[in-house]
Amino acid sequence: MKAAYITQPGPPENIRYGDLPPPQPGDMQALVKVAAVSVNPIDTYIRLGMVTMDFPKPYIVGCDVAGTVEAVGLRVKGLKPGDRVWGSNQGLLGRQGTFAEYAAVDEHWLYGTPENVSHRDAAAIALVGITAHLGLMRDAKLQPGEVLFVHGGSGGVGSCVVQMAKIVGARVITTAGSEEKAEICRRLGADLAIPYKVENVDEAIRRFAPHGVNVWWETLREQNLERAVGHLAFRGRLILMAGRDSRPLFPVGPFYVKDCSVHGFAMFNAPPDQQRRAAADVNRWLAEGKLRPQIGRVMKLAETAEAHRLQEDATLRKSGALAGKIVLEP
Ligand SMILES: NC(=O)c1ccc[n+]([C@@H]2O[C@H](COP(=O)([O-])OP(=O)(O)OC[C@H]3O[C@@H](n4cnc5c(N)ncnc54)[C@H](OP(=O)(O)O)[C@@H]3O)[C@@H](O)[C@H]2O)c1
């Protein structure tokens, strides 16, 4: 089968697109004929060698997948050939990645794709949808009427956080690097989208939420916690989930006197039952048209190296050239 893989960590040019033997599904696995995959920033960190985990050799890049079940292992109970499925959390913790024509995936990481949802949309929402759900529902316990702030409402995680917070009934503030991206955020439901390059974000937040922000979701890799904690309301929750090298100062005084809490998490640590609960809501909202994946680019699987270059430039060098997910198809 064709696959995008590396044999050594390094720059995007290390990604080869070529033939590898197709995987054999284990007893508890389904063999998925891949229809679409999507890129996440962690794919680029892994390829660069920034993530310390065990990886198979050669290592097929990528976490997210959508496609059709081709065959199932002896002990698979809930899936059969022909089922449309999506999943995430591959290419991590010793598991092989998804950027290939076929992927063998444990049944417990796969979810049925609703009839009216395309493979492209399912692949685009996978990791970011589960991440947003875990942070908002499990950790922040966002409530109707609360105010939520998230940086980058047109980005992969940000666009899911904006939409899910609106589904909960929260009031949503976000930022955008251009007026065009601010318009995307408003279309996704944001009550206030601040073009941060031309407007004063702190003043805009204070005008919109004079009593503070109940949940501050930080998507930036370099955090200003003085600022985040300053905007938190009494019993506010701070979500930290990006920037593995980040070591910012933490303003303890203003934090504890407001009874605030901080939640850090990495989605790949969440066990299958937690991810499945998140995926069930994602599926329902996708089918109802309440959750719309924000797709910035669609490319061919053969262009994986170029897709990594685009994602890495956006994430690590803040190119601003991307609005949402890069989806690739074989
Ligand atoms: N812990 C976890 O489980 C988990 C899961 C998924 C992702 N992550 C991490 O979360 C981060 C975001 O992931 P993603 O997939 O959403 O990436 P993404 O699609 O590239 O989005 C990043 C967003 O950040 C915004 N941004 C960049 N610089 C900014 C600045 N100075 N001020 C305000 N906004 C800025 C960009 O918006 P503009 O272009 O409008 O500036 C963009 O929308 C990454 O670091 C990723 O590794 C963690």
Image (spheres, helix red, strand yellow):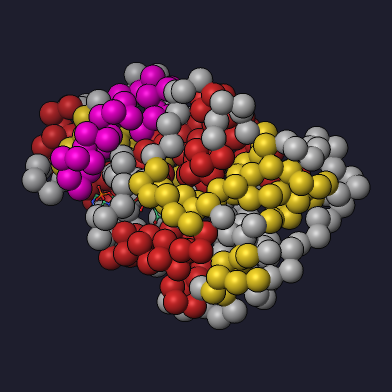
Q: Quadrant of the N terminus?
A: bottom right
Name the one closer to the observer, 52 or 198: 198
Picture coordinates of residue 14 (x, y %)? 49, 78
Picture coordinates of residue 183 (x, y %)? 22, 34
Name the one closer to the observer, 213 or 318: 318
Name the one closer to the observer, 16 or 190: 16
Instruction: Give yes or no for residue 50 being in the magenta stretch.
Output: no
Q: In this view, does 202 lie to the left or right of 256?
A: left
**Image height of 48 relative to 63, above or below:** below
Residue 281 visible in the displayed image = no
Instruction: Give yes or no for residue 186 being in the magenta stretch.
Output: yes
| Residue found 73% across the figure and 36% down from its top | 83
Q: Is residue 329 left or right of residue 317?
A: right
Which residue extends farthest right? 74
**Image height of 142 relative to 51, above or below:** above
Residue 112 visible in the displayed image = yes
Picture coordinates of residue 151 (x, y %)? 29, 44
| Residue found 55% across the figure and 70% down from its top | 17
Residue stretch in magenta: 162-190
Find residue 150 and report its image quarter: top left
| Residue found 69% across the figure and 70% down from its top | 20
Q: In which quarter of the image is the C terminus?
A: bottom right
| Residue found 50% across the figure and 31% down from its top | 137
Q: How many labels does the image show?
A: 0
